[in-house]
Image (tube, rainbow, N blue to C red):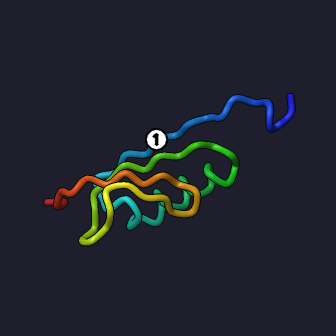
């Protein structure tokens, strides 16, 4: 089976922190995206960030909620 004929895998990361702010979460998500996975990162929104975006191949879904 070649890489292009394999079904695409999906990974969802959920963190109670700003979606793009936690380096551990970002590294894991970006690594999987580079390996060909579809990656969704769900987290809190930092001030001024859009609700949906893409960062280094990762689909970012942000909720407008403060952490505490």
Q: In which quarter of the image is residue 51?
A: bottom left
The residue at 21%/57% (across/down) is 64
Q: Is residue 14 above or below residue 25?
A: above
50 to the left or right of 55: left
**Residue sticking out furthest to the bottom:** 48
x and y percentages locating residue 14 in the rendered image: 37, 46
**Residue sticking out furthest to the left:** 68
Q: In which quarter of the image is residue 10?
A: top right
37 to the left or right of 4: left
Q: Quadrant of residue 22?
A: bottom left
The residue at 32%/54% (across/down) is 62
The residue at 80%/30% (across/down) is 5
Q: Which of 60 and 68 is in front in this view?
A: 60
Q: Which residue is denoted by mark 1 in the rendering?
A: 12
Q: Which of 53 and 68 is in front in this view?
A: 53
Q: Crowding at label 1, few (<14), some or many (≥20) Cα neighbours within 10 Å?
A: few
The residue at 58%/57% (across/down) is 57
Q: How many labels does the image show?
A: 1
x and y percentages locating residue 16 in the rendered image: 28, 53
Q: Quadrant of the C terminus?
A: bottom left
x and y percentages locating residue 24 in the rendered image: 48, 61
Q: In which quarter of the image is the N terminus?
A: top right
The residue tagged with tag 1: helix, strand or loop?
Answer: strand
Q: Is residue 40 above or below residue 1?
A: below
């Amino acid at each position: 089976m070649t890489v292009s004929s394999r079904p695409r895998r999906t990974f969802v990361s959920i963190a109670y922190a700003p979606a793009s702010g936690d380096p551990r979460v970002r590294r894991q998500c970006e690594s999987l995206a580079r390996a060909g996975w579809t990656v969704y990162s769900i987290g809190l929104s930092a001030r001024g960030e859009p609700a949906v975006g893409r960062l280094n191949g990762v689909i970012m879904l942000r909720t407008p909620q403060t952490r505490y």
